[in-house]
Image (cartoon, grey):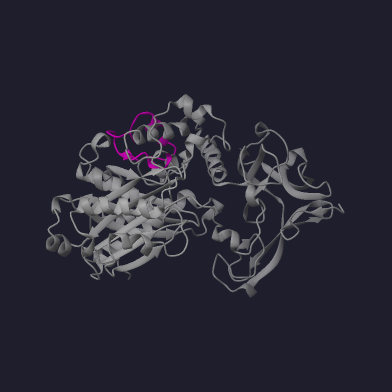
């Protein structure tokens, strides 16, 4: 039988840092990444030469951007691995960094995500197969189709979807790293011309630039490097799955999330009701409604009512995307999954300042990448 | 019907009946797929030799739809409607719907394929679209 992360030695997040997510600027990616890394090193209280292995997540920068960035921290000869897994690149880099520590190969690793907007050709477009719709169906139209189906099944209204954006934009307004930092009313979210179906621009995540870094350590690393164990956050599980064929052609979106999160929670020994923080892939508002239900945070069809009643607010039953999520914090691709880990780490330490969810102990990070792949990690404050 | 088709590798006319989509069926697991390919079965992994070319009748149930206001396609003017159709012959496809209003659409209704002129494209070219079956 194959082994799980928890079958190996414990892994902890000991440092997190970001460069704020923002619209495209002339700033080179190297400067974005170095900013996030230096903040993460400072947060962990470790020096760069102690880092044994770096996992660099990008989806848009092209071949081998890691070393031109990392050399500015000091050319220590550490291992460098580049990770591309679409929107889940950062989550996958985190998973690989954690597995390497769990296996005993290293005691202190970094996972850093960095990206700048760029036009690239998806692998699926180069696969040699034609499609009926070609460029007529953008990503937001895929999710508009999901929204229409959800509305039909659960009698949801355009307001039900828009409330996800209202909540997450309010959270993002309290996050200095967020790309969108202005709260918006329901009327403002709904007032703009739609992209497709119910979905208006503020219900769609901005694709910008930024960087996020997390530093991971073993217990040996924490002890040897004098890292404060009270601020270390345990990585309880790491799960990565991909789309398969689902019964009745129901599509991968919700089903892939359900099976990935279920597996990750089971590996962690955590029930959905025990989650205090959830950072999920809300690239489009409908996703939050679908995913919280399939994660087991509420019954099918009950997400709009719970959202409206504040159950998913900071201070509610479970804070969903207290960072602002992809809708407000932004979605620069490579960094996004690591930005989720950074937010959860801060929340579990009690260091999230004005976004702090009271008494947060356990968190879930969830990302979907085009393809489709899905990554889930469960983290817990142990001290 | 002597007009050219926009995607002749994906569908074709079929006499007096609805158009057909060009797909395949796996001789090992029976899964029907679209578009047609010969690399391997997504259902069971059987090699391409097991994927037998078949035609799939352009008819099925409407799973969802959305009015598209923005898109990157250069061959059609927005707004238009895209639908997801669960073909009676197996695969789920996405296709542009015939001109009309979304109020005429109901999830779960029967849809049928038609080969239509795209007003924004060459008048000699027809493309596959779907419309409610009762409107045919």
Closer-to-camera residue (A70/A203): A70
Per the rendered image, the range of residues in magenta is A299-327
Above or below residue A55? Residue A169 is above
* Image x and y of residue B12, in percent: 77, 57
Q: Quadrant of the N terminus of chain A?
A: bottom left
Q: Is residue A193 toward the left or the right of residue A230 in the image?
A: right
In the rendered image, the residue lying farthest to the right is: B2
User: Magenta stretch mostly in which secondary structure?
Assistant: loop
Residue A305 shown in magenta: yes
Closer-to-camera residue (B85/A199): A199
* Image x and y of residue B13, in percent: 80, 55
Q: Is residue A34 toward the left or the right of residue A116 in the image?
A: left
Query: Which residue is drawn at the image coordinates 84% and 55% (left, top)?
Result: B15
* Image x and y of residue A225, in percent: 14, 61
Q: Quadrant of residue A90?
A: bottom left
Above or below residue B35? Residue A24 is above
**Residue A364 visible within the image:** no
Query: Which residue is drawn at the image coordinates 56% and 65% (left, top)?
Result: B42
Query: Which residue is drawn at the image coordinates 23% and 37% (left, top)?
Result: A353
Query: Which residue is drawn at the image coordinates 43% and 34% (left, top)?
Result: A165
* Image x and y of residue A38, in percent: 26, 53
Q: Is residue A122 toward the left or the right of residue A262 in the image?
A: right
**Residue B48 visible within the image:** yes
Closer-to-camera residue (A308/A329): A329
Q: Quadrant of residue B68?
A: top right
């Amino acid at each position: 039988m194959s082994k799980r992360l928890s079958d190996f030695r414990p892994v902890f997040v000991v440092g997190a840092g970001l460069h704020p997510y923002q619209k495209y600027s002339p700033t080179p990616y190297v400067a974005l990444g170095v900013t996030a890394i230096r903040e993460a090193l400072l947060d962990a209280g470790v020096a760069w030469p102690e880092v044994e292995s770096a996992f660099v997540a990008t989806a848009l920068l092209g071949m081998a951007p890691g070393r031109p960035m990392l050399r500015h921290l000091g050319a220590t000869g550490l291992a460098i691995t580049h990770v591309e897994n679409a929107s889940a690149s950062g989550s996958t880099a985190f998973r690989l960094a954690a597995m390497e520590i769990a296996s005993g190969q290293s005691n202190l690793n970094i996972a850093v995500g960095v990206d700048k907007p760029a036009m690239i050709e998806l692998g699926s477009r180069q696969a040699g197969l034609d499609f009926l719709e070609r460029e007529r169906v953008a990503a937001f139209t895929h999710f508009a189709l999901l929204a229409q189906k959800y509305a039909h099944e659960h009698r949801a209204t355009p307001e039900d979807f828009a409330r996800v954006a209202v909540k997450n934009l309010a959270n993002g307004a309290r996050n200095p790293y967020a790309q969108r930092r202005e709260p918006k009313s329901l009327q403002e979210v709904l007032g703009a011309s739609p992209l497709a179906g119910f979905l208006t621009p503020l219900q769609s995540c901005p694709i910008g630039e930024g960087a996020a870094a997390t530093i991971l350590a073993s217990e040996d690393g924490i002890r040897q490097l004098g890292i404060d164990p009270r601020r270390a956050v345990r990585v309880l599980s790491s799960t990565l799955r991909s789309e398969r064929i689902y019964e009745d052609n129901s599509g991968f979106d919700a089903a892939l999330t359900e099976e990935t999160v279920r597996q990750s929670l089971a590996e962690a020994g955590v029930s959905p009701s025990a989650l205090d923080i959830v950072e999920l892939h809300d690239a489009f508002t409908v996703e939050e409604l679908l995913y919280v239900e399939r994660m087991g945070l509420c019954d099918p069809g009950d997400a709009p009512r719970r959202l409206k009643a504040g159950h998913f607010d900071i201070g509610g039953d479970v804070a969903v995307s207290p960072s602002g999520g992809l809708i407000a914090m932004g979605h620069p691709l490579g960094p996004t999954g690591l930005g989720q880990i950074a937010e959860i780490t801060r929340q579990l330490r009690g260091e999230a300042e004005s976004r702090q969810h009271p008494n947060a102990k356990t968190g879930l990070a969830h990302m979907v990448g085009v393809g489709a792949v899905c990554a889930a990690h469960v983290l817990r404050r142990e001290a | 019907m002597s007009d050219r088709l926009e995607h002749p590798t994906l569908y074709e006319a079929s006499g007096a009946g609805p158009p057909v989509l060009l797909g395949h069926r796996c001789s090992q697991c029976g899964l029907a797929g679209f578009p047609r390919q010969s690399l391997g079965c997504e259902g069971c992994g059987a090699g391409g030799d097991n994927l037998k070319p078949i035609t799939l009748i352009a008819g099925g149930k409407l799973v969802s739809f959305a009015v598209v206001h923005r898109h990157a396609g250069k061959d059609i003017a927005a707004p238009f409607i895209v639908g997801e159709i669960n073909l009676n012959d197996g695969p789920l496809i996405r296709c542009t719907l015939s001109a009309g209003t979304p109020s005429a659409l109901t999830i779960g209704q029967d849809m049928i394929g038609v080969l239509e002129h795209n007003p924004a494209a060459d008048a000699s070219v027809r493309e596959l679209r779907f419309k409610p079956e009762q409107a045919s």
